[in-house]
């Protein structure tokens, strides 16, 4: 009898993690899901709540799992939490746990735009995390995702909140393009990366089939019925630097206006998935 697959997921209470956990649970995969915050369990799942991902608590429970999906990360930093500590040093902690637990595979979500030439603090922390994974000796798949969208991602929730206020504010011209990918496609790709050998030791851009300007995305999402207000980009950056509660952080803005493009055709070929068009999803209203 084939041994049942056991997978560990960090950052289990987040948007992407919740969708992955649901998908894997329905496939009867044994899950060990870890988070700093409480969350609702699915079937076939063991929940671990640990503020510091304490090795004494976690290691005995994850031993000899097949794979670990590492989804912990921050997109904005403050004096309490900085990119290097969370995105890089914590990844090193997870790698050490994985090795001690004799986990064979690690899947990591980095970011679209990460490269050796970046000057962004966020991208640098992700790039350094990637290097740690590559040099770990573990079988790895590193994904560099664009915006991952669904009904409850942060971007979608922001737009819904703005629609309730009858006005959507966008930074700058809005003509910069994004390449969103649907969360239902993401969970399939991540699962395939665990069970299919062709994903071994690969870095793959996790992007959808459509390039779309930010302003067009907003118009399609809101069905054109809401006023759109363009905010001066300099003012957006000033607010991001001086207001910790700003809607867009400095690195959010850098990513948004960076106009990063990924190789969807490579993703499509290696995964064999027929990806959902985000433009068609927006037109159908299924993301609202």
Image: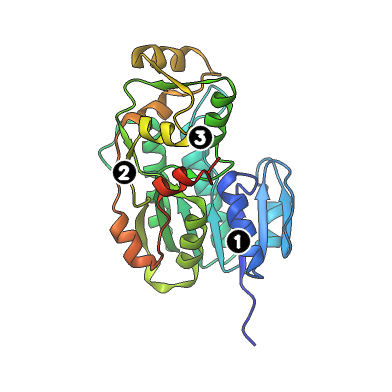
Specify which label sits upstream in the sequence, 1 or 3. Answer: 1
The one nearer the camera, 227 or 218, is 227
Q: Is residue 113 left or right of residue 29?
A: left
User: Relative to 216, does residue 273 appear above or below in the rendering?
Assistant: below
Specify which label sits upstream in the sequence, 1 or 2. Answer: 1
The residue that disc 1 covers is 23
Check residue 132 in the rendering and tell me which mark sits there, or answer none. none
User: Which quarter shows the N terminus?
Assistant: bottom right
SS at badge 3 = helix
SS at badge 1 = helix
Q: Residue at x 65, y 45 (%)?
A: 13
Residue 285 image point, x, y percent: 52, 43
Query: Do the numbered discs 2 and 3 sit on residues whose CB atoms are within 8 Å?
Result: no
Question: Is residue 169 something that shows in the picture?
Answer: yes
Q: Residue at x 54, y 21 (%)?
A: 79
Specify which label sits upstream in the sequence, 2 or 3. Answer: 3
The quarter of the displayed image where residue 273 is located? bottom left
Residue 62 image point, x, y percent: 66, 62
Q: Is residue 57 left or right of residue 72?
A: right
The residue that disc 3 covers is 155
Crowding at label 1, few (<14), some or many (≥20) Cα neighbours within 10 Å? Answer: some
Residue 183 image point, x, y percent: 51, 51
SS at badge 2 = loop
The one nearer the camera, 237 or 185, is 185
The residue that disc 2 covers is 211
Q: Is residue 275 left or right of residue 13?
A: left
Query: Do the numbered discs 1 and 3 sit on residues whose CB atoms are within 8 Å?
Result: no
Question: Is residue 200 something that shows in the picture?
Answer: no
Separation of disc 2 and disc 3 at Cα? 17 Å
The quarter of the displayed image where residue 46 is located? bottom right
């Amino acid at each position: 009898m084939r041994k049942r697959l056991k997978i560990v997921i960090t950052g289990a209470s987040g948007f992407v993690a919740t969708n992955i956990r649901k998908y894997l649970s329905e496939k009867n995969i044994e899950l060990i899901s870890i988070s700093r915050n409480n969350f609702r369990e699915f079937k076939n799942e063991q929940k671990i709540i640990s503020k510091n991902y304490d090795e004494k608590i976690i290691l005995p429970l994850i031993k000899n799992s097949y794979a670990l999906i590492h989804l912990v990360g921050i997109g904005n930093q403050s004096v309490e939490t900085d990119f290097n500590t969370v995105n890089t040093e914590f990844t090193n902690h997870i790698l050490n746990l994985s090795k001690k637990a004799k986990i064979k595979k690690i899947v990591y979500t980095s970011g679209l735009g990460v490269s050796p030439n970046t000057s962004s603090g966020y991208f640098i922390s992700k790039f350094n995390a990637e290097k740690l994974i590559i040099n770990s000796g573990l079988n790895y798949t590193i994904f560099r995702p664009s915006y991952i969208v669904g009904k409850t991602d942060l971007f979608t929730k922001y737009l819904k909140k703005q629609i309730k206020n009858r006005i959507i504010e966008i930074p700058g011209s809005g003509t910069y393009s994004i390449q969103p990918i649907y969360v239902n496609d993401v969970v399939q790709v991540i699962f395939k990366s665990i069970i299919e050998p062709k994903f071994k030791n690969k870095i793959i851009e996790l992007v959808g089939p459509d390039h779309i300007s930010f302003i067009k995305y907003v118009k399609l999402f809101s069905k054109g019925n809401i006023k759109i207000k363009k905010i001066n980009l300099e003012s957006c950056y000033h607010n991001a630097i001086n207001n910790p509660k700003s809607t867009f952080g400095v690195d959010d803005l850098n990513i948004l206006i960076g106009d990063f493009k990924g190789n969807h055709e490579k993703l499509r070929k290696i995964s064999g998935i027929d990806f959902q068009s985000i433009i068609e999803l927006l037109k159908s209203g299924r993301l609202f």
